[in-house]
Amino acid sequence: MRINVILWVNLDPIQDPCMHAKLDGPALDTLFRTARTRNGWTAEPVSEEQIRELYELLKWGPTSGNSNPARFVWVRSAQGKAKLVALASEGNRPKVLAAPVTVIIGYDLDFGEQLPKLFPARGEAMKASFAASPVAAETTAFRNGTLQGAYLILAARALGLDCGPMSGFDNAGVDREFFADTRIRSNFICGLGTGSDEKMFPRNPRLTFDEAGRFA
Amino acid sequence: MRINVILWVNLDPIQDPCMHAKLDGPALDTLFRTARTRNGWTAEPVSEEQIRELYELLKWGPTSGNSNPARFVWVRSAQGKAKLVALASEGNRPKVLAAPVTVIIGYDLDFGEQLPKLFPARGEAMKASFAASPVAAETTAFRNGTLQGAYLILAARALGLDCGPMSGFDNAGVDREFFADTRIRSNFICGLGTGSDEKMFPRNPRLTFDEAGRFA
C-alpha cells in the first residue's frame, strides 16, 4: 500500500484579504524613520531596469477616479541634465548634476483623455465632466499628480534608492523645455540614486500630534 | 587549550548609512501591488494608539523646507461623523458612516508661522518670504500638504490599516465646520480601518511606463 500525501502550505499572505501584515521595524525605518532627503550623491548608477521597476510599483498608488494625472521625465543624459540644470535654482544645480537620475514629476491637465481607458465603467462621463470644468480638472490634476509624486518617493525608498525632492526651479521654463506642445505642467523634481552624506543637515523637528491635528 | 570565539553579526541594516535594504515582496504588496481602496468597512475598531502611531510615522515624510503644512482632523465620534456625512457627496456618506475613522487632511495657509521652529537655520527668513508671497504660500501648502496625505495613506497601509481616500465632499462646508477661525483648507478625506470587499470594483488598469513618461 502506498499513501500519497500532498501538503499544501500557503506562504502568500496576500491570498487572504482579511490579513493585514504590518511591516517590520527596519522596513518602517527605510520608508520613513531613518530615510533622509539627500543633497549629495555617490557614483553608484541607477539602471533603466530600476527606473521601470520603480514605475511599476508607484503606478498602483490610488488616485481619484483612477485619474493617474502624473507624467514623468527621467532625466539622465548629459544633454537632459544640462537643460534641467540651467533651469534649476542655484543651490539645486550641483544636485541635479551629481544625481544619476533626476525625475521631473508633472501633471497633465488633459488627463481626462485617458479616463475611458483608465476607468472603463465611468470614464466617458468623467472625461466630459472635466472637459466642462477646467478648474476642477486643474485641482484634480495637481492634487493627484502630487499624491503620485509622494508614491514615487516612498516606492523609490522601498526599492533601496535614496531621494532628493526639490521645488526650486523655473517651472515655466521646464514646461517649455520638457513638455512643449502638451498641457503637462511641472510639479516638482526629485533626484534618485545612492545618497552621500554631503551637505546633509541635522534632521529638523516635526510638529507633535497635537500641533498637527485633533480628534473630532 | 580552550579557544573563545566571539561571532559578531550586525542584524540592524540601519546602522550602516550606505546599506539600502530593499523591502521584500509581501511588504511591496501591502504598500502598493495588492492594496485596494476600500468602500466598505468591517466593525474592527481603530484605537487612538493606532492613530498616534500612524502620525508618528507619516510625520517623517519629506516636505519642502520642512514646511509640514498638513493638518489632520481624525473624525471618529458620532457627532463628528454626522457633521462630515452631511457635507459628503451622496455616494461617500455610507463610507464615512461605516469607517471607524475618517481623517480630514487639510493644509494650513499659515504654515509659515511654524517655520522658525521647524527649520531653525532658515525659518525666520522663509516665514517672511511666504508672508510676502501668498501665491507661493498657497502652492507650497497645497503641494506639500498633499504629499503628506500620500504619506498618510502609505503609512497606514504599512501599519496594517486599509484606506479609502475620497475627494467628493463640500470643501467650503468642511472648512467652515472643522477649520473655523483658521486659514486651514480641506484637501481630501480618507477612511481608515479594516476594509471589507463591499462595493469593491475589479481593479482598473494603469498607464504603461511609456504612456506615463519618457527618458531625457
Image (cartoon, coloured by chain):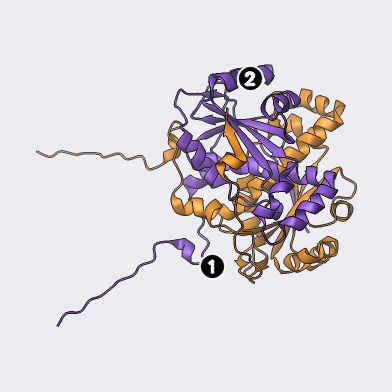
Chain colours: A purple, B orange
Residue B37 is drawn in which quadrant? bottom right
Name the residue rendered at 69%, 54% in the picture.
A116
Crowd band around label 2 with a 10 angstrom C-alpha radius: few (<14), some (14–19), many (20+): some
Q: Which residue is mark 1?
A: A18
Location of residue B52 in the rendering, given as x and y in whole percent from the top left corner = 65, 53
Question: Could you tell me which quadrant the N terminus of chain A lies in?
Answer: bottom left
Q: Subunit of mark 2?
A: A
Three-letter code for the amino acid on which mark 2 is drawn: Lys
Question: Could you tell me which quadrant the C terminus of chain A lies in?
Answer: bottom right
Left or right relative to B60: residue B122:
right
Q: Nearer the viewer, residue A133 or A30?
A: A133
Q: Residue furthest bottom?
A: A1
Q: Which mark is residue A83?
A: 2
Same chain for labels 2 and 1? Say yes or no: yes
Left or right relative to B203: residue A121:
right
Crowd band around label 1 with a 10 angstrom C-alpha radius: few (<14), some (14–19), many (20+): few
Location of residue B145 in the rendering, given as x and y in whole percent from the top left corner = 73, 42
Name the residue rendered at 84%, 52% in the picture.
B171
